[in-house]
Amino acid sequence: MSTTTGNETTWDNVFSYHPMPVDLASADGVFLFDTQGERYFDASGGPFAVSMGHGHPRLTKAIAEQLSSYAYVHPMLGNRRRADLCDRIAEVAPKGMRASYLVSGGSEAVETAIKIARQYHVARGNGGKHKIISNYESYHGMTLATMSLSGNPGTTRHYDPMMLQWPKIEQYSDYRKPESLSRDEWGVLVARELEKTILYHSADSVAAYIATPHGCGSDYGVVPPDAYWREIRRICDENDVLFIADEVVTGFGRTGKWFGMDHYSVDPDMIAFAKGVSSSYVPLGGVIVSDVVNEVFNKGVAFVHGFTNGGNALACAVGCAVIEAIREDGLLEAVREREAQLFSYRDRLLAHPNVADVRGWGLFMVLELVKPDPDGKRNFFAPQEQAELKFQAAMLRNGVAMYSTLYGPNRRPVMQRGLPMWIAPAFIISETEMIEMMDRVDRALHQWEQGMTIP
């Protein structure tokens, strides 16, 4: 809890919590309001989580109605809301993916997926398959197992002795692509690193490969070509390796389709989801499992797993309301319309000397912020320059709240890449709200650049 001294609120009794100097009073639509009456655009929906905006009438009504009946179900009793939500998810999931296991967040979802992969192989007599391959600079959660998948030494270095040393490969990167190759050609070459890694570790030991539909780390928001995923699918199939798509960020409309992988010609074996499925009104996540993977469990194999709040009735009621709203209010179409408007600002943003790249898809834009030098090179900001802290302060002064990178202060300068900052507003943002928000972002960028002393 916070403590109050006079008119000043501190956070001394909240363990390791250091909020920006904004004390939230209320929220509505795409706006946040603090206790001083100031208004802020929720430009990233927190960590790309508030897809439906704040105070959505469908979602608040669903919570109130469910709460009037029951909020929690004894694990040994039937929870109709869980079945309702799984039915709704099956209706919008890729073909051949009908069963869902519900949990209460993204880290739990990824951990669930890798446990399903392990038990799937064991049930088929392939007990040696236990390794999960992931990408360097990826992010899959904050439990010890999911941090083991995330190839970010800045966030895992404190826990290294406790990490599972699973193999990793480079993710697709336009930044590293040779000019002589097309994106398709480069995508196939990058994907074949997975094949090589499986060969060196032995297919008999590899259970699954997990990746996000777009890049992470310094390449956040980089969208690989279809050829990349086709090659990944081929390699997984030929080696009896499951492909897990981590769609905690991209799932349920963020890219203008129900799932990020819907943009491609291949389907994964499992989809981990969270965030957008409940717009973070109530903690909710899960894993969608393909019919092929689910077959061994349908034959009687019990999945040894579970969380107290998995399939929470309030969360499931909200999840159903989110899917209904996306369908009935035409929000996938709205995301595509606002995507065109959002990325129409690309050239204007790139005109800033500190913006090295603007990329992404749907309502998910990434600005890569760098420090130019007199020779025209683009360099990483040293931690002592506090570039990210100053950037956030400039945004707040201009009425914009954006999520921090979590990577910037810890990334090693040798990588020579910038700070990724995200713009991922709610699907309900209007045309005029988008104009005002981007004008404020543009103005804040200019002020931040002046404060960082452009050469």
Image (spheres, grey):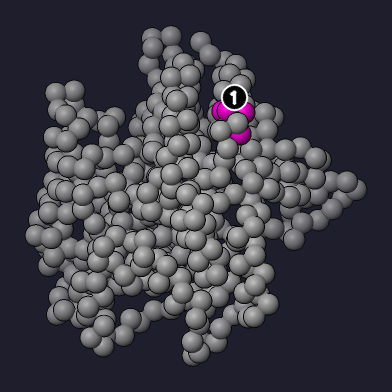
Q: Quadrant of the N terminus?
A: bottom right
Closest to the observer: 56 or 32? Answer: 56
Q: Quadrant of residue 163?
A: bottom left
Does the magenta portion include 387?
A: no
For mark 1, give the secondary structure: helix
Residue 193 percent location from the top left of the image: 16, 46
Tell me, yes or no, if residue 348 can be seen here.
yes
Instruction: Identify the residue at image location x=21%, y=53%.
Output: 266
Which residue is most to the right? 6
Closest to the observer: 57 or 236? Answer: 57
Instruction: Identify the residue at image location x=59%, y=24%.
Output: 439
Q: Amino acid at mark 1?
A: Asp
Closest to the observer: 412 or 438? Answer: 438
Prevailing SS of the magenta stretch: helix
Closest to the observer: 307 or 387? Answer: 307
In the rendered structure, which segment of residues is drawn in magenta? 433-439
Mark 1 — residue? Answer: 439
Rendered view: 291 above or below 14: below
Instruction: Identify the residue at image location x=31%, y=70%.
Output: 98
